Amino acid sequence: MVKEGWPTSSWWKRWRESLARTRDNLVGQAARWFAGARDEGAWQELEDALLTADVGVDMTARLVRAARQARNRDPRQALREEILGLLTAVEGRLELPGPLDVIMVVGVNGTGKTTTIGKLAHRLRGQGKRVVVAAADTFRAAGIDQLAIWAGRAGADLVRHREGSDPAAVAFDAVQAARARGCQAVIVDTAGRLHTRVNLMEELKKIHRVIARELPGAPQEVLLCLDAHTGQNALQQARVFLEAVGVTGIVLTKLDGTARAGVVVAIADQFRIPIKLAGLGEGIEDLADFSARDFVDALLPTPD
Amino acid sequence: MAFENLTARLGEVFRRLRGKGKLTEADVNEALREVRVALLEADVNLKVARDLIARVRERAVGEEVMASLTPAQTVLKIVYEEMTRVLGGKTSRLDLGGNPPVPLMLVGLHGSGKTTTAGKLAVFLSKQGKFPLLVATDVYRPAAPRQLEVVAGQARVPFFFLPGAPPVAIARRGLEQARQQGRDVVLIDTAGRLQVDEELMAELVEMKAAVAPRECLLVVDAMTGQEAVNVARSFHERLGLTGVILTKLDGDARGGAALSVQAVTGCPVKLVGVGEKLDALEPFHPDRMASRILGMGDLASLVEKVEAAVEAERIRELERRIRTQEFTLDDYLEQLKQVRRMGPLDQLLGLIPGLGRAVPQVQVDEKDLVRTEAIICSMTREERRDPSIIGASRKRRIAAGSGTTVQDVNRVLKGYEQARRLLRQLPDMEKSMKRGGGRLWR
């Protein structure tokens, strides 16, 4: 996949620095363990550190076990490899075979869908693609205006209806328009919805169905935006959205803060959904390919 | 199942405890280990959970438990009490004292729900006879002021924004505007920001100094994980928060963040967001939240909601019918109608003690309710009283009468049958609640 022009590593470095600034960073919490101490207190520190990174109870137990059972090698190495193994298995890239690809962006309220779409449109434009953005978030107040501004910045076409209109119809029109204009990509913005709202999830399925019917093989990507600050509920979100619309990739957003998003390790293990992108700020270029190695480097100290 | 909500989890722990006659120290420890796991899975911060558990253990192991006739009850009560205490003890109100216009500031991370909450607050305060002004100071996110403007329109409250002006100046001018227009509350919505963003945090500090808000409220997503503690601490250190608003509590996140945030800031949660509509903002009740978390249901909330919607007499009658198990389709319809007045059914079911555990997967579609109503209304009185007489021919007639299909009729009958079965379990549950700590929420 195309990667040129994407200074991936520098973004991750920025996150690493951001994490290092907090007084509660993972390594700081388990300083003794990472320094080599292996008494019970040190192991407890490690467990605590993982728990406060939102890794979750079960996954923490598993990681600590893996580190404890390390034979003939450093437990730090074992821990690192365990996490890296889980995340490398889900490290993914956008798969856009063309000639016309539809990307549907979904998630609960406030996870950064619209911002991600702006960045994504900009990225695809940078690859010389003509992009249509579909304002299928017809619920949120001024959601369409917000997307319109992003589309303008990215130089993408916008397909919009009135506020409150049928989102599936917007998606339908966008696919039609993209075909008529000879565009290469359609990005569909959807309204944020809590995964527990059954009728809203049905609405999402309908949008998905309409796209699939209009363009065989579409949507090529269904991206779930997950806020890095989310705790264990992210597992539920991944489960329900995966079941409803067959999520093909995760975008981890707001990774420029101090949240460590450890829950993605459990998500990787349970659902095997590829993690494809990471959002690291509000600038139009602040979108990086997900890198398991960089993620783990930021989380744990790099081996000497 | 890997993920269980806190209610289900603690329900399991305490069911086991209830099964035993006496509690040993080992029992207490085992229970508390599970409580700890449950708290962590509910995203309660590790340190906060640990402190809570330590206090419970200190109180539970020893005299109090041993002297008690029902030890399980005692442990349950102590966990509940300690949680309630951390959650702030009693319901806190917004402080709108001082000379009008009284400024309020909403701050928080990106996407926590500040703008929606600002609109909800405007509606909430309008209902109390206040005249709020909504002020947009988010000059960073595209169309953010426009979003607040639309929300203000929906809330029927005036809106203020100064394109091109810096946020602090807008806030100051908004306050002046309110004074001139005779508005008595000024709700200042701010841009989302990371607590480590020095520049933007400084802007908030400056804004706070400029408008001297009576309340500086942190808006927190109920789904926030362990980081809630750092976010809350930083905002509190820089701004001196006076309260917290917890949003998106209508999802299935247990909202452990509420415990965390209060524990580190000492600021009470004052309001909770429970839906997408602008009237979905409610006062926060620590005792109810704790009892809900503990799987004891939220009787107080339920009673209040029911009373607000229907006459007490009807409830008593319905209650009697449920008790005596003569629950007909008429009652079912009556219940559905009441439910529509009270709010989403899934929220309501969560409030009934024991049901949180019994039906964790209840899902209700509001559109279905309309269809169900039509179907039941198309039945004869006899059919409603005794649905067993409804055969294929009657079903066809009912379907035609209600503009639905026979399948829809079948679905309603099945739903009714399920509800009846569910309600039949209620009296039993009540008994078990009494045994297991039924007096706790009173």
Image (cartoon, rainbow, N blue to C red):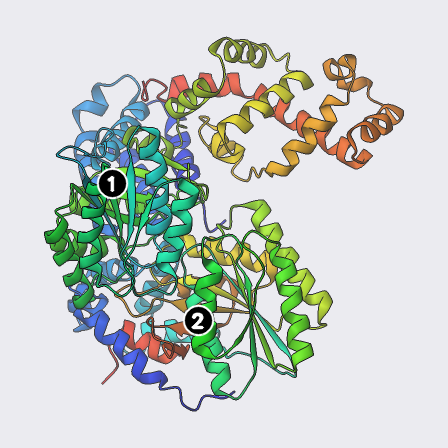
Camera sees residue B113: no
Evaluate whether label 2 is on the same chain as label 1. no
Q: Residue at x 30, y 28 (%)?
A: B129
Furthest residue toward right: B393
Where residue A114 sits in the image (x, y, percent)?
45, 65
Q: Position of residue B119 (x, y in %)?
A: 36, 44
Tell whether B146 sits left or right of B36: right
| Circles 2, 1 touching at the beta carbon (< 8 Å) | no
**Tag on residue A150?**
2
Q: Is mark 2 on a helix, strand or loop?
A: helix
Task: Label 1, secondary structure: give it.
Answer: helix
Mark 1 residue type: Gln
Q: Judge whether B359 appears above or below A78 on screen.
A: above
Few, some or many C-alpha atoms within 10 Å of disc 2 (few <14, some 14-19, many ≥20)?
Answer: many
**In front here: A153 or B200?**
A153
Give the chain letter at badge 2: A
Q: Is residue B229 above or below residue A13?
A: above
Q: In which quarter of the image is the C terminus of chain B?
A: top left
Mark nearer the viewer, 2 or 1: 1
Q: Which residue, as the protein is rendered here, is positioned at the far bottom?
A: A4
> Which residue is located at x 26 percent, y 55 percent?
B190
Q: How crowded is mark 1: few (under 14 residues within 10 Å), some or many (20 or more)?
A: few
Compared across the picture, whether B208 is left or right of B135 comes to: left
Q: How far across and down, in percent of the image, does residue A279 sit? A: 38, 72
- The amino acid marked with disc number 2 is Trp
Q: Quadrant of residue A32 in the image?
A: bottom left
Q: Mark 1 points at which residue?
A: B181
Q: Residue B91 carries which label?
A: none
Q: Where is residue A257 in the image (x, y as percent from the top left)?
A: 27, 66
Chain letter of the residue carrying label 1? B
**Residue positioned most to the front:** B180
